[in-house]
Image (cartoon, rainbow, N blue to C red):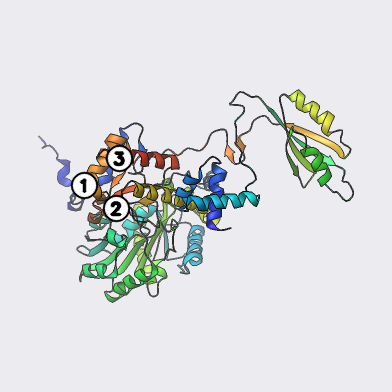
Amino acid sequence: MDEQTRNILEILEEDARIVPEEIAALTGMTVEEVNQKIEYLEKAKIIRQYKTVIDWELAGENYVYAIIELKVQLERKLGYQAIAERLYKFPEVRSVRLLSGEHDISITVRGNSMKQVAFFVAEKIATLDQVQSTATHFVLKTYKENGLILDEPDQVKRLAVSP
Amino acid sequence: MRTQCNPSRFISNSMQKVPPSGIRKFFDMASGSEDVISLGVGEPDYVTPWHIREACIHSIEHGETSYTSNYGLMELREEISRSYVKRHGVYYDPEEEILVTTGVSEALDLAIRAITNPGDEIIVVQPSYVAYVPSVIFAGGVPVTIGARGENDFKITAAEIEAAITNKTKAVIINYPNNPTGATIGKDELEAIADVIVEHDIMMISDDVYERLTYEGTHTCFSALEGMRDRTIMLNGFSKAYSMTGFRMAYAMAAPEIINSMMLIHQYSMLCAPITAQVGAIEALRNGEEEVGKMVREYDRRRKLIVGGLNDLGLDCFNPRGAFYAFPSIKSTGLTSDEFAERLLHEQNVVTIPGDIFGDTGAGYLRCAYAASREDIKEALDRIGTFVDGL
């Protein structure tokens, strides 16, 4: 990856709202070059989406998250893809990952209450033909999300002038 | 009845030759102000990477709290040696050519004291870090300052060094990338300086603490130049590259005779660097590259932001290729560096450091450290703009 591309990606990963003019000031590129580069990165699907990390707890929305580990039965020819597609279509399912080790797949589910999540798992996930067993872990607190520390960021306590 | 004591009568002559650091005045002024944006700090604004802090905690938990060799932990010296072979192709023997010190400041003091006899002249290239001249005076030497000029992008030339050499000259101190200007110097220019050093049979003290913060071009290690290894005392440290200022971790590398002399002073004054910080330094060298890369890329962005912003405000700023300082000229405003910095602090709450504190050729310039958040840099630029518009 060239230096300019890395620069733009790192800047956008940190702040998706930053405007091209500011990226240009930070990278020494022209605004036009920045726009062209971003357009290419979007078309190439290297930039997949611009999202916001929200601390819903602080916003007063008490969402409940659970991580559910699944053991699944593989389908001939389709492997894990078919079950993954079944799983990721549920809007409650926020992430789907294939794992190595004891379980095959891990999904993250979001709901409004523990009861709602429990029923969703029991009725929609555990009942799928390919699913052999589930293990549900409710998330009690999120300290870090997508690389961002939600709890308390490190702060530098520096003097205003070096002695 | 006993007569009253006048303590100042006992202060040594060399102490009386050293004025207090000009930075101190701004330190005191800024300490009393609210809502201050500081471009005055020569210190990374990152907390030391976690893996380094964690290594130190682990070390303490396991009871590593003892003295180390006067030279420093062998493991650390070996890592330092490897890093110089890897980056510059120059080998220093960890056994007898590397000394771990508490900060480059100590390494500098030891280097000067190890080679200076009373009356020896040490050439100090300015603008430069404020400790060089006092360190020479404390050692009983005579500092001979020569100024790198803005017209030459603050690079000193071999001819300028040669013109300052006398039969009393013992060494030259250079610092590239430079604090306060951010200037770097090319291999060809250093080769020419090396010729002068050899011709006059003197030494070079090279303070490379900002080496890793080189954004354009490649840093040339002076001791890696042909014939320069044994004529150079290399000083380097962990403060800037790994954001470890409070750890006070640095090292000196030179010929065994020089390092041994430096070690003697170190042995009787400092004894050894703190073991916990040395453990952190080992971790930094072994696993710190990714973090260094990230920090350097971010400093580079801020560099472009601040240099572009200062130029847009009409404060002509040459392109600093290293360190984390912008050094704009404020000559167009008609104010002196001191007036500009003091009024800027009082009227807009922005801390900068007057350039002439770092040497005469820094007059008419301002040191702006961009090791500050982008938000702070943007806000500082806005405030400097308001200040300049109101002049």
Along the viewing direction, whichever of B360 and B241 lies nearer the viewer = B360
Q: How far apart are marks 3 and 2 (CA)?
A: 16 Å
Mark nearer the viewer, 3 or 2: 3
**Image x and y of residue A53, in percent:** 60, 35
Q: Which of marks 3 and 1 is in front?
A: 1
Q: Indicate the quadrant where residue B348 lies.
A: top left
Query: In the rendered image, which quarter contains the C terminus of chain B?
Result: top left
What's the mark number on residue B302?
none
Q: In which quarter of the image is residue B223?
A: bottom left
Task: Check residue B27 in the rendering and tell me which mark sits there, or answer none.
Answer: 3
Q: In which quarter of the image is the N terminus of chain B?
A: top left
| Residues beneath discs 3 and 1 located on the same chain | yes
The image shows residue B63, relative to residue B286, as above or below, that is above
First of labels 3, 2 by sequence position = 3
- Separation of residues labelled 3 and 1 (CA atoms): 24 Å
Which chain contains the residue that carries disc 3? B
Q: Earlier in the sequence, mark 3 or mark 1?
A: 3
Q: Which amino acid does label 3 sit on?
A: Phe
The crowding category of the residue bearing disc 3, from other C-alpha atoms within 10 Å (few below 14, some 14 to 19, many at least 20), is: some
Q: How crowded is mark 1: few (under 14 residues within 10 Å), some or many (20 or more)?
A: few
Q: Rounded to the nearest whole Å, what is the CA distance between mark 2 and mark 1?
A: 29 Å
Image spot of residue B22 (x, y percent): 25, 46
> Which percent across, then down, holds residue B297?
49, 52
Q: Mark 2 points at which residue?
A: B131
Q: Which amino acid does label 1 sit on?
A: Gly
- The residue beneath circle 1 is B334
